[in-house]
Image (spheres, grey):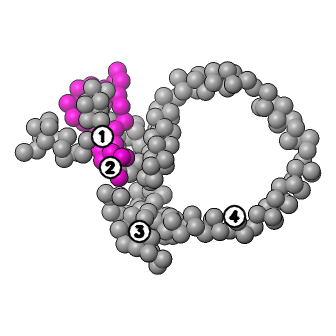
Amino acid sequence: MFLHLIDRKTAKLYGLKFYFTGNPCSKGHICARRSQCGGCFDCGKHHSAESHAKNKEKRNAQSREYHSKNRDKILSRMARYGNLTREVRNEKASLWRKENPKKRVAYEAKRRSLKIGSFGSFTVEDVDRIMSLQKNKCANCQCCVLGGYHVDHVNPLSKGGSNGPENIQILCPNCNQRKHAKDPIQWAKENGKLL
């Protein structure tokens, strides 16, 4: 279930990849649509699966032909990357995570949103823009968050919120841990911002 109803024109204006109107497509699917072409997300998945099954032999033949023509190239690539031990790969990944904390947050949020079927994604630039709009303060308690912050989904992903920049805010770690996956109206009432 998606909480944000948005039309295609507005989605394109904000640079969103998906939009949701709440109306069914011609085949009756009520789901997100692609901003670029207006196509239904579920129809695209079904078409892709059918095409995949129908052209399996052709793709396998193309793959065998490519591998036979590019054997040396493939072997050199495997020698370069395939011999890395799990410890070395984990060490490199750990180092990347430490050097790119903002990108890590965006990638992890996108992975979680895709896993539960949500749509949208935000970038490091979106986080920096929202941080600037919030004047480096927590959206809830107004404390300075330059020492550390969490990127929070206003409407939680688990309750149908999108992962787009329109649904994120910056909170201090304490506020984000207290908010957890609460509905924004319930959270505002608990903090005395709504009666």
Residue at 78 percent across and 32 percent down: it is 82
Instruction: Name the outermost residue toward the bottom.
Output: 26
Q: Is residue 21 left or right of residue 44?
A: left
Task: Give the camera-side residue of 98 and 110.
Answer: 110
Residue 195: give x, y in percent of width and height: 7, 45
* Secondary structure state at the residue bearing disc 1: loop
Point out the tag, 4 or 1, that comes first from the N-terminus: 4
Tell me the number on the disc at residue 52. Answer: 4
Please state the extent of the stretch shown in magenta in the rendering.
134-160
- Identify which amino acid the numbered label 3 is placed on: Ile
Point out the tag, 4 or 2, that comes first from the N-terminus: 4
- Identify which amino acid the numbered label 4 is placed on: His
Residue 71: give x, y in percent of width and height: 91, 44
Residue highlighted by disc 2 = 159
Is disc 1 in contact with disc 2, using a CB cutoff of under 8 Å? yes
- Identify which amino acid the numbered label 2 is placed on: Lys
Point out the tag, 3 or 4, that comes first from the N-terminus: 3
Magenta: main secondary structure equals loop
Residue at 27 percent across and 26 percent down: it is 174
Point out the tag, 1 or 2, that comes first from the N-terminus: 2
Tell me the crowding category of disc 4: few under 14, some 14 to 19, or many 20 or more residues within 10 angstroms, Cα based. Answer: few
Residue highlighted by disc 3 = 30
Residue 56 within the magenta-colored segment of the rendering: no
Tell me the number on the disc at residue 181. Answer: 1
